[in-house]
């Protein structure tokens, strides 16, 4: 289970933050911990320091024009929280700096196996100390934790005695769980949301007054208020509330004293003559009387309950109440205080978990609730009732029977979050249409055009993977791209599913180029080569912009054969010789570099070679290394308009986590929801970059050529001229690298291609 803190901070320096985070990870062994299977056991692995840990950075210098900064920050936080950890891959904690215009937020996520709320407070205190030390020009003054022998660190938990479990079974006998009345809702089972509510000054004063009068902690008052609202709402009789009990050390104590927490069930029955003070008194006494038995876990108690009590109480209490104390308050990062925002959790551990936070002079109630059972309005009504009960009970002798609440509650067994009887929202669409609607997140009709709906290359990969998995048939992508609609896709899949003929073993193994547009007799033939990590799709708008009789074909990499530039070029040249050479050979990005090598190979083997159309292609022998961050920028720029793409991006040293975060950014910037397809494309991109950056000796080609520059500078164009001995023309466009194949720039590229063909025909 992930624990995420979302903090609104002052302006942070990314480089200083990186250095401070590394010091924190090196200090705490828990952050360098992973878990692995060893036979039937799970073993803990603590990696040595120093450890390569870097915060992720997603920085927009200005707010994207199509949404507010708050909406973007909200969605990123929710999606970052949801990224799972691989327990065998340390660190099991991650830090992300998200900046949208003037607003900085830190999203800190850890797996609950290595960190809890109190540990998170300690971690952020250390992060602040490290940040200040680095900011002041020194090394962060964070000594590593003292080594603790593994047996002492893991501790031992002896089974409870019969008397210890009987303490709980006696008190829970015949009790029923208090819960809110569940609503019929369409959320996915186990889905959750969080509300953060600050108590009014009047209610806050009432808690202090009642606590002094009864002689108890403020938490006992809050516990009594929750129980009273549920009882007045209909949860009558002897009922239980789940309560998290723990030692609450200060930060100074916690540096040397361990922290333990446990969930217990406290039972009580509110009578007709009870005053609110009496309910508070019993809450106080139940906490103190059970103190010697707080170490007995609820699963141990549950195992000893009578069958009827087990069936009634269940394994998870519907309503949990916990006191977080000062967790999340008093945090400073850099020169300014940081404010803890509502948890971005979208899952529910029970029907409703009420956390009580002490935030300076304020008290904050943070409610995590099961959206499959409860709506936001229901939770807000419950919180308003808590406020009303507290305010009405300030005077001594206030009777519970006189209190009125709008909350509807029950003492029947509540359906647990995600339980077997959870309501499931069923999509009425079936088959291919359902897959389309999942990818686009909206209604799709059978004859809607994929690209008219705003689809792009990554969504094609996801959609194809989805429909092929669900149908068990392989889609003819080339045929579908001629008419990219759900109806055509379903037709092709049906044909593929019924085509059971065995492949011809005598058929040649050589792959054929993809026909992007068939053209017409007498028309020109343009052949293009794929870019890095992509295939035919980036060329779709270019094909549409060319004269209607032009034939357009594309060489794609199957990701299987050898991947050097020379090998790929030789393979694609063989395809062209088998099908007939085109009138014009070209490519965008890596495709241009490969087209140049194809031309060199054709010339060397004595074949004629068509003119070259090189679209912002990297210069042979001068291709920079490009890691996962570069892939992420390319994927984002190819999927979304420029303003939606972060101005600065750093996704950290681990590819799996980086790609999960990239998927988050694709979802929030372009509506994409790629999973396995993104990993496959990254592997292909890495293969292509390795090929381009491998040492080789580029050859000079004597053919007419047009180099269209977007991101290439004048030095790059001069270097290209050195590898092109024929009539070479260089043209610069106003578009950037990724805008070159979209309108309006692609119309200019199409015109230049036509001019190149005309000039070449005249020269011949």
Image: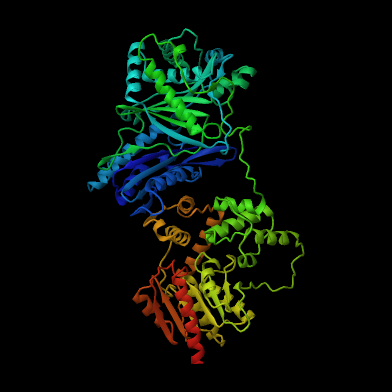
The relative height of residue 513 versus residue 16 in the rendered view (above or below) is below
* Residue 700 visible within the image: no
Residue 204 figure quarter: top left
Name, please, the residue furthest toward the top.
273
Between 93 and 515, the residue placed more toward the observer is: 515
Residue lying at 53% horizontally and 29% vertically, measured from the top left: 351
Q: Position of residue 511 (x, y in %)?
A: 64, 72
Q: What colour scheme has been applied to the protein in the rendered image? A: rainbow
* Residue 280 visible within the image: yes
Between 346 and 654, the residue placed more toward the observer is: 346
Residue lying at 45% horizontally and 54% vertically, measured from the top left: 669
Q: Position of residue 591 (x, y in %)?
A: 50, 72
| Left or right placement of residue 493 versus residue 763 in this view | right
Total marks placed:
0
Residue 451 figure quarter: bottom right
Q: Position of residue 73 (x, y in %)?
A: 40, 46
Between 2 and 421, the residue placed more toward the observer is: 421
| Left or right placement of residue 418 versus residue 659 in this view | right
The relative height of residue 270 versus residue 711 in the rendered view (above or below) is above
Name, please, the residue furthest toward the left.
136
Between 371 and 305, the residue placed more toward the observer is: 371
Q: Position of residue 714 (x, y in %)?
A: 34, 76
Residue lying at 32% horizontally and 15% vertically, measured from the top left: 209
The relative height of residue 289 versus residue 474 in the rendered view (above or below) is above
């Amino acid at each position: 289970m992930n624990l995420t803190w979302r903090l609104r901070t002052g302006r942070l320096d990314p480089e200083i933050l990186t250095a401070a985070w590394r010091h924190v990870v090196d200090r705490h062994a828990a952050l360098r911990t992973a878990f692995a299977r060893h036979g039937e056991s799970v073993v803990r692995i603590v990696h040595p320091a120093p450890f390569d840990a870097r915060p992720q950075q997603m920085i927009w210098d200005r707010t994207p024009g199509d949404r507010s900064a708050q909406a973007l920050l909200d969605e990123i936080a929710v999606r970052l929280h949801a990224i799972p950890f691989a327990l065998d891959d340390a660190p099991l904690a991650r830090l992300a700096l998200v900046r949208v215009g003037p607003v900085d937020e830190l999203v800190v996520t850890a797996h609950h196996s290595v960190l809890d709320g109190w540990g998170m407070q300690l971690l952020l205190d250390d992060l602040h100390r490290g940040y200040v030390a680095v900011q002041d020009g020194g090394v962060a003054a964070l000594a590593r934790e003292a080594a603790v022998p593994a047996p002492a660190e893991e501790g031992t938990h002896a089974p409870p005695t019969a008397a210890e479990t009987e303490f709980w079974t006696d008190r829970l006998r015949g009790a029923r769980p208090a819960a809110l009345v569940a609503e019929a809702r369409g959320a996915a089972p186990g889905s959750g949301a969080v509300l953060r509510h600050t108590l009014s000054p009047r209610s806050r004063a009432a808690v202090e007054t009642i606590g002094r009068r009864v002689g108890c902690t403020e938490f006992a008052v809050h516990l009594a208020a929750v129980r009273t609202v549920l009882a007045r709402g209909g949860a009558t009789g002897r009922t239980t509330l789940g309560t998290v009990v723990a030692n609450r050390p200060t930060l100074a104590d916690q540096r040397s004293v361990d922290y333990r927490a446990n969930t217990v069930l406290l039972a009580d029955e509110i009578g007709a003559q009870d005053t609110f003070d009496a309910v508070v008194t019993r809450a106080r006494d139940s906490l103190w009387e059970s103190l010697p038995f707080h170490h007995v876990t609820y699963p141990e108690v549950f195992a000893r309950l009578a069958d009827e009590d087990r069936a009634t109480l269940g394994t998870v209490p519907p309503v949990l109440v916990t006191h977080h104390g000062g967790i999340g308050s008093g945090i400073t990062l850099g020169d300014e205080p940081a404010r803890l925002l509502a948890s971005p959790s979208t899952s529910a551990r029970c029907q409703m978990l009420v956390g009580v936070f002490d935030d300076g002079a304020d008290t904050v109630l943070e409610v995590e609730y099961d959206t499959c059972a409860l709506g936001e309005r229901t939770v807000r009504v419950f919180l308003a009732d808590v406020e009303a009960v507290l305010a009405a009970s300030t005077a001594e002798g206030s009777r519970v029977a006189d209190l009125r609440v709008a909350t509807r509650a029950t003492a029947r067994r509540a359906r647990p979050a995600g339980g077997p009887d959870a309501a499931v929202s069923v999509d009425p669409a079936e088959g291919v249409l359902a897959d389309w609607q999942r990818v686009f997140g909206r209604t799709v009709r059978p004859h809607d055009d994929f690209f008219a709906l705003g689809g792009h290359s990554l969504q094609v990969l996801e959609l194809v993977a989805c429909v092929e998995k669900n149908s068990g048939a392989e889609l003819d992508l080339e045929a579908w791209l001629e008419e990219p609609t759900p109806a055509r896709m379903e037709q092709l899949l049906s044909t593929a599913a019924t085509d059971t003929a065995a492949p011809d073993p005598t058929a040649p193994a050589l792959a054929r180029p993809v026909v992007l547009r068939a053209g017409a007799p007498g028309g020109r033939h343009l052949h293009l080569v794929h870019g890095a990590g992509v295939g035919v799709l980036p060329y779709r708008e270019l094909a549409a912009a060319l004269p209607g009789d032009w034939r357009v074909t594309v060489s794609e990499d199957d990701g299987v054969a050898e991947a050097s530039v020379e090998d790929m070029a030789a393979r694609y040249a063989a395809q062209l010789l088998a099908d007939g050479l085109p009138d014009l050979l070209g490519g965008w990005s890596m495709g241009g570099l490969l087209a140049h090598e194809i031309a060199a190979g054709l010339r060397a083997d004595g074949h004629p070679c068509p003119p070259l159309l090189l679209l912002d292609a990297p210069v042979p022998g001068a291709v920079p290394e490009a890691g996962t961050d570069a892939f992420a920028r390319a994927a984002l720029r190819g999927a979304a308009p420029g303003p939606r793409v972060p101005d600065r991006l750093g996704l950290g040293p681990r590819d799996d986590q980086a790609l999960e975060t990239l998927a988050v950014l694709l979802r929030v910037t372009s509506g994409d929801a790629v999973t396995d397809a993104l990993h496959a494309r990254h592997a292909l991109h890495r293969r292509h970059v390795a090929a381009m950056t491998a040492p080789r000796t580029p050859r000079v080609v004597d053919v007419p050529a047009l180099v269209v520059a977007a991101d290439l500078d004048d030095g790059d164009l001069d270097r290209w001229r050195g590898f092109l001995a024929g009539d070479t023309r260089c043209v610069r466009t106003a578009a950037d690298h990724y805008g070159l194949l979209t309108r309006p720039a692609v119309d200019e590229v199409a015109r230049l291609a036509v001019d190149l063909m005309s000039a070449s025909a005249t020269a011949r």
